[in-house]
Image (spheres, rainbow, N blue to C red):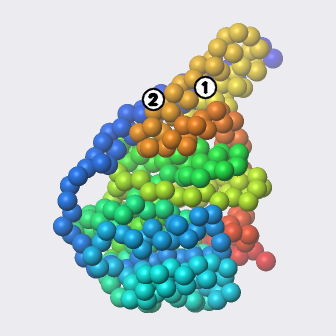
């Protein structure tokens, strides 16, 4: 029993040390990556473009979020709001915005088209038929965008070697404890890890809330129809573009995504869904995150030892995690995240459970619909 305890303590020390080192490294990589985020460079590349906004149901802050794309500092662009059901409760809001800004700027599309299991892609398939420009921006309905957003995201497409562009994002408006936990998952864990992978070149990212791509490029990689059964359609877009020999640009520009969860159950299923996404997109890097989960293993180490050394080890792990997360949050302009850092140790402990569940569950629930995961990241609706 004594030998077993010693072995377990040694095993626990690996992620404790690995997590501490990784947390410190993320501070450096976030600072390096975001140093040009406030650049005052004037972008002269402002081609006409179409923004696709798929919408389904009412969401927190929905009208404000949708209006932010209509007040962009950009000379010539088309906006398409799309729903799949004319009785969608969001449709009256879309009508209001169209009346405010005019039908010359904003088009509404209602299309019940269902090519595959991915509802977002199905919605986009109805909208893209009405797009009049080659460059399209796919922008989620829960994003809140600054007036310079379009100029920023389209600028890299001036380079013919660039296949698509995406932006970083941070979660805002965590009103309930479970929404605050969701906020910390993204802002204090996922995005710093994405930036670390981008800076070190260990992995690539194509983030779905905000993507710019040419329709011609999209067609060369199979078109939207070919993505309709993928759970992680954004990563699949990026993967195909990388394989085509073109680049995916991740901008040092952060947009806001409004979190909207009804209850703790929704939060739990979404956390498992999020880890399933990550696992399907990048299985080996996701599995390797077990080596940087310092707080849950520091807690286990303390429980095994049951003495002051174990307690000091736990306090040290929590301190490093909170300080480094606070610095990265500050660099990202995430004041809300800083205010909620007291929840981060609990989120990290539960994060280990979500990590484990992502391997064992082959079903995923999104927007109330249950899906079954199949091979190579695809899914089917489970009846």
| Residue 43 falls in image quadrant | bottom left
Of residues 251 and 93, the one drawn nearer to the viewer in this rendering: 93
How far is mark 2 from mark 1, CA to CA? 13 Å
Name the residue that disc number 2 marks: 24
The answer to whether residue 166 is seen in the rendering is yes
Of residues 291 and 22, the one drawn nearer to the viewer in this rendering: 22
Q: Quadrant of the N terminus?
A: top right
Residue at point 76% right, 56% down? 263
The answer to whether residue 218 is seen in the rendering is no
- Residue sitting at the far right: 1
Relative side of 180 to 221, left or right: right
Name the residue that disc number 1 marks: 318
User: Mark 2 Cα within 10 Å, few/some/many (few <14, many 20+)?
Assistant: some
Residue at point 50% right, 51% down? 170
Of residues 368 and 223, the one drawn nearer to the viewer in this rendering: 368
Label of residue 11 in the image: none
Is residue 29 depicted above or below 89 in this figure? above
User: Mark 1 Cα within 10 Å, few/some/many (few <14, many 20+)?
Assistant: many
Q: Quadrant of the C terminus?
A: bottom right
Identify the secondary structure beneath mark 1: helix
The answer to which of marks 2 and 1 sits earlier in the sequence is: 2
Whole-percent x, y for residue 348 in the image: 64, 37
Relative side of 33 to 338, left or right: left
| Residue 277 falls in image quadrant | bottom right
């Amino acid at each position: 029993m004594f030998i077993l305890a010693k072995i377990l303590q040694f095993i626990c020390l690996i992620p404790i040390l690995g997590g501490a080192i990784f947390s410190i490294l993320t501070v450096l990589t976030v600072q390096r990556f975001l140093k040009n985020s406030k650049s005052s460079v004037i972008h002269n590349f402002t081609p006409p473009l179409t923004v696709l906004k798929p919408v389904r149901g009412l969401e927190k802050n929905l009208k404000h979020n949708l209006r932010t794309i209509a007040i962009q500092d950009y000379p010539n662009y088309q906006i398409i709001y799309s729903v799949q059901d004319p009785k969608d409760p969001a449709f009256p809001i879309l009508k209001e915005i169209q009346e405010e800004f005019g039908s010359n700027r904003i088009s509404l599309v209602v299309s019940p088209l269902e090519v595959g299991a991915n509802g977002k892609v199905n919605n986009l398939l109805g909208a893209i038929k009405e797009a009049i420009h080659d460059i399209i921006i796919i922008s989620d309905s829960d994003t809140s965008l600054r007036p310079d957003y379009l100029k920023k995201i389209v600028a890299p497409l001036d380079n013919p070697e660039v296949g698509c562009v995406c932006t970083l994002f941070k979660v805002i408006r965590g009103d309930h404890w479970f929404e605050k936990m969701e906020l910390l998952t993204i802002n204090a864990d996922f995005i710093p890890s994405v930036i670390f992978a981008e800076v070190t070149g260990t992995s690539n990212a194509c983030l779905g809330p905000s993507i710019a791509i040419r329709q011609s490029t999209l067609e060369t990689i199979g078109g939207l129809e070919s993505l309709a059964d993928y759970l992680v359609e954004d990563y699949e877009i990026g993967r195909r573009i990388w394989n085509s020999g073109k680049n995916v640009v991740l901008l040092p520009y952060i947009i806001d995504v409004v979190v909207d969860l009804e209850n703790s159950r929704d939060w739990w299923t979404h956390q498992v869904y999020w880890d399933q996404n990550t696992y399907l997109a990048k299985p080996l890097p996701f599995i390797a995150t077990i080596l940087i989960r310092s707080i849950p293993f520091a807690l286990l180490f303390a429980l095994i030892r049951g003495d002051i050394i174990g307690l000091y080890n736990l306090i040290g792990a929590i301190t490093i995690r909170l300080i480094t997360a606070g610095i990265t949050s500050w660099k990202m302009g995430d004041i809300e995240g800083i205010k909620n850092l007291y929840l981060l140790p609990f989120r990290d402990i539960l994060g280990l459970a979500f990590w484990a569940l992502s391997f064992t569950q082959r079903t995923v629930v999104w927007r109330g619909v249950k899906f079954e995961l199949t091979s190579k990241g695809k899914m089917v609706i489970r009846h």
